[in-house]
Image (cartoon, rainbow, N blue to C red):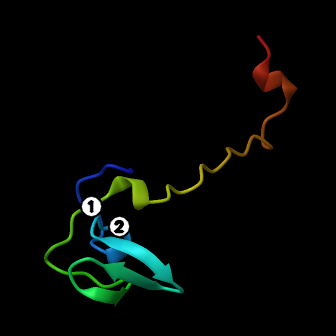
Amino acid sequence: MLFRKNVAKFCAYCVHAGQADNGQMLCRKKGFVNSDSKCWRFRYDPLKRTPSRYQAKDFSQFDDRDFSL
C-alpha cells in the first residue's frame, strides 16, 4: 500500500515540501502552504508516508481444541 500508483496528491507527501509547523509545509516551489493543498508539480515521496498500523486478529472466538491436531 505504501508504493501504490494512485496516491492522494497532498503536499505532505511531496518531494518538494518539508514540514514547517502545525499543518504548514514549506514548499521549494510555492513557499508556505497547507499540508493538504496540492499543485501540478507534485512528486510522490514514499518515505514521507506513515503506513497504517496492522490490526491484530481476534482469536477470542476459538478455543484450544481449534488449534490442536
Q: Secondary structure at mark 1?
A: loop
Counting from the top left corner in percent of width and height, residue 20 is at 46, 81
In front of the other: 6 or 12: 12
Q: Residue reaching furthest left?
A: 40
Q: How many marks?
A: 2
Is residue 35 visible to the viewer in this orientation of the structure? no
Kind of residue sitting beneath label 2: Tyr
Amino acid on which disc 1 is placed: Tyr
The residue lying furthest to the right in this view is: 64
The 10 Å Cα crowd at callout 1, few under 14, some 14 to 19, many 20 or more, is many
| Near-viewer residue (16 or 65) | 16
The image's mark for residue 13 is: 2
Q: Is residue 50 above or below residue 29?
A: above
- The residue that disc 1 covers is 44
Q: Compared with residue 7, is residue 56 higher up or lower down, i.e. above or below?
A: above
Q: Disc 2, disc 1: CB below 8 Å?
A: yes
- 42 on left or right of 36: left
Give percent across and percent down for residue 17: 33, 73
Please give the name of the residue rendered at 48% of the width and 85% of the height, measured from the top-left corner: 23
Query: In which quadrant of the rendered view does residue 14 lie?
Result: bottom left
Q: Nearer the viewer, residue 14 or 69?
A: 14
Element under disc 2: helix
In space, the residues marked 2 and 1 are separated at their CA atoms by: 6 Å
> At which x and y percent is residue 7?
29, 63
